[in-house]
Structure formats: structure tokens, C-alpha cells
Image: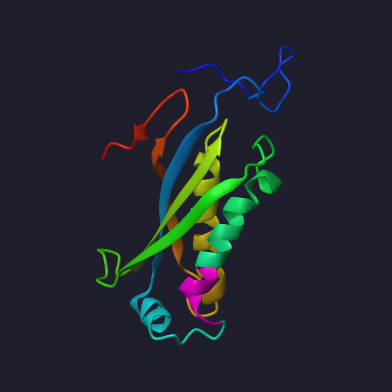
Amino acid sequence: MSELTHFNVDGRARMVDVTDKKVTHRTAIAMGRVRMLPETLKRIQDGKIAKGDVLAVAQVAGIMGAKRTPDVIPMCHPLLLTGVDIAFTEYPDPDSEGLCTVEVVATVKVEGQTGVEMEALTAVSIAALTIYDMCKAIDKGMILDGICLEKKTGGKSGTYERSR
């Protein structure tokens, strides 16, 4: 396991000093799922959710979440993100538990001295929470799961890709 860098010599929390790190092109791709009743997904697809276009609102919320990551994750550096994209894939066939899925994928890019993994994970989380918020009146049993980092590139540690 690598050394934890968010602690000072006294063992107290600190923001990592990236002053001497090289600026590189960095990307992170995160994903997660929202599992729901088939009727909920059908209403999303048909535009029949009272609060509006669920995926359009979730997309904007995810982008905003990526941009605001340092406001909610204390040791994250504020970054000038160069790109944030949120994509959704709908899986309408119910799984073994009778639930359908909306998969959320966030891709975040930056030219910087530190990575954007937390921004991508935050974007997915906020987009998924927004789907839940917009549909909770008809499906309180929705499940958010599988939120993870799929891939990251750039920086000293290079490329990471989740193995299946």
C-alpha cells in the first residue's frame, strides 16, 4: 500500500502540496448505477416524471458536482476542469430482482498537477442522487450502487484501468 499523503508530520490532516508536480493532461472515468422498478424507468423514458426531464437535470447536476468537488471533499484541490461529460445507458430488461438500471458514466479532464478521480466520482454520485431525488415520489426503493473509478490517465502514476 502506498504512503498516505494527507497527513502532516504530526498526524493531522493537510492538503497535499502539488507545487513541484508536473502539469500533465489527466482524465478520469467513473461509473455507477441507479436500479429501479421497471415502471420508474418507463416514466423516465416517456418524460412522465412530474419534476421534469430526469436525465437532462441529472446531467447538469453531475457536471455541477464535478465543478464543486472541493467544496464537499475537504482535501481536494480546486481545479480548472477542461471537460466534464455525463452519459447514461438505460437497461430496460429487469434483473433477477426485477429492477431495471440506468448506468451513469462521468468523464472528467484537466491539465493540472493533480488528478480528477474525485471529480469524476462526485459527478457520478450527484447525477445518481439527482435521479433518485426526481423519482423518489414514485419509487423510494431505488438503489444506487457500483460507484467506482473505471479508468484514470496522466500524472506520475500513469494509467489505471479497473480489471473486471
Residue 125 coordinates in the image, percent (x, y)? 52, 54
Residue at figure coordinates x 63%, y 25% from the top left: 18
Location of residue 95 with respect to 12 vertically, above or below: below
72 lies left or right of 142: right
How many numbered dots are placed on residues in this image? 0
Q: Which residues are magenta?
A: 52-58
Which is the main secondary structure of the residues drawn in magenta? helix
**Image quadrant in which the C terminus is located:** top left
Q: Nearer the viewer, residue 26 or 138?
A: 26
100 lies left or right of 105: left
Q: Is residue 121 magenta?
A: no
78 lies left or right of 89: right
**Image quadrant in which the N terminus is located:** top left
Q: Quadrant of residue 97?
A: bottom left
Q: Quadrant of residue 112?
A: top right
Q: Is residue 98 visible?
A: yes
